[in-house]
Image: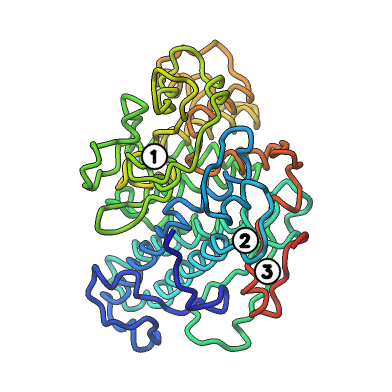
Amino acid sequence: MKKLNKLYIGVLGMLLVFSACNKDLNLKPYQQLDQSQAILTAQDVQITLVGAYNRAGLSDLYGGGVFFYPDLMATQTTIDWHGTFQQLTQMTNQQIPNDNSFVNSLWLDAYEVINQANNVIANLDKVAAGDKERVEGEAKFLRGLTYFDLARIFGKTWNDGDPTVNPGVPIVTTPTTVISTSSYVARSSVSQVYQQAITDLTTAEAKLPADNSYSASSFSAAAILARLYLQKGDYANAATEATKVISSGNYSLNKTYAAEFPYPNQTAVHVDNTSEDVFAIQVTSQQGVNGLNTYFASSNDGGRGDVHVVPSFLSNFESGDARAGMFQYDDPTDPTSTLRCHKFDNVDGNVHIIRLAELYLIRAEANLRKGGTPTGDSPVNDIKVIRGRAGLTTPATVTVNDVLNERVRELAFEGGFFFHDAKRLGQTIGTLPFNSDKLVFPIPLQDINANPNLKQNPGY
């Protein structure tokens, strides 16, 4: 994998970066620009916002890594890892050193997105009145989304001890343009980082339009809030936010499960979002990388073929479940050949950050857990929607365990759910308890060395 040059060091390196979008926007060839020189007009603010999306889509972040790396930590009984990247093998072995370059890049990319968003927010006065709320909403969506994932990767899960005490990640909400003593930011608590994400996403939901092309919309923010509240165990709010998306009428499930993962015979053309995508990272042959394609797809489909699915995983599916069709042997006549997940076979396939099916599953689980009058619709009806699309009938009653099983069948390998669901449910991950120090990613060593106020996680 081509790794990003380490031009900065984590929290100390959140300098304004425009190079990510230079090739598309024909910007001056500067790697770093002083804010007073770089952001002078509304167009400059928009360019900075485009740059934030661009960096969010890097392979170590929302180009796939932010979901793939946690799942590598949690799929010991689900996949066989055949990759040659030693530092990804460390993840599958649940033995990550604090100088793992993939972890370092995830952290760096995340804080560059945050700093780009901070620069947009700090310069809203330059934006035309008619665009100001949208621009602010998009920047805060990206910042809130990123802080949420940083908190659950580099901090203990919400239900592990006291989130008001457990360290999360540094919160920075103003642009970093020069390095000074104020740049040495300490880690905020898990609770504080979650609250920052909630504040950003709630603001984004209020300010963004319902339809915003490929960019974040108000319903993108509501969808991520629903995911966050479920992770946090706030089931009433999870059901409420999920209902906003489902009831909007802006999205609908594809007629077939396979249609959510279009495979246009590798024609190297961009495939638009489907009706089910609430938010996705756009990938084209000219820009972006689908990191999930890199690791899951065979060489015939542009990937490395590093991930082999364990055949016993197929036992999760009932007879006639169309979703099982996404898992096929290289030789259909030979069950001893490699079993692959074919969700990510399109080299230029968009990376699905969140899709409508997940919202039905969030609402069903949240309604079951909170009890009382269901918000939006009954869990039975929500599961009927999911199972019906898969060609299955639904029993008259459903349990939380039924919903969790549907999450595995529906969302496998898409969003780090093997890892994050196991942690929120208090399940053993591999041979480790959910609250093991080894299941919290290390703060990158280069940042620990550079920032005297940044404390390492236990065990590293």
Q: Nearer the viewer, residue 433 or 251?
A: 433
Estimate the x, y position of residue 6 in percent, counting from the top left.
49, 74
- Mark 2 to mark 1 CA distance (whole Å): 38 Å
Locate the C terminus by quadrant.
bottom right
Q: Are marks 1 and 3 in contact (CB under 8 Å)?
A: no
**For the residue marked with disc 1, what is the amino acid?**
Ser
Left or right of 255? Residue 6 is right
As drawn, 75 above or below 451? above
Quadrant housing residue 392: top left
Give how far across and how far down residue 327 sits, in percent. 44, 27
Which quarter of the picture shows residue 301?
top left
* Residue drawn at the location 23% of the way across and 71% of the way down: 25
Name the secondary structure under disc 3: loop
Where is 301 relative to 378, above or below? below
Q: Is residue 309 above or below residue 83?
A: above
Q: According to the image, label 3 marks what residue?
A: 187
Quadrant that contains the N terminus: bottom left
Q: Secondary structure at mark 2?
A: helix
Q: Amino acid at mark 2?
A: Val
Q: Please name the residue that numbered disc 2 is placed on.
A: 193
Q: Which disc is residue 298 wearing?
A: 1
Label 1 neighbour load within 10 Å: few <14, some 14-19, many 20+: many
How far apart marks 3 and 2 lie (CA) works out to: 9 Å
Q: Nearer the viewer, mark 2 or mark 1?
A: 1
Residue 321: x %, y % from top left = 44, 17
Earlier along the polypeptide chain: callout 3 or callout 2? 3
Q: Residue at x 58, y 56 (%)?
A: 87
Amino acid type assigned to the residue bearing label 3 in the image: Arg
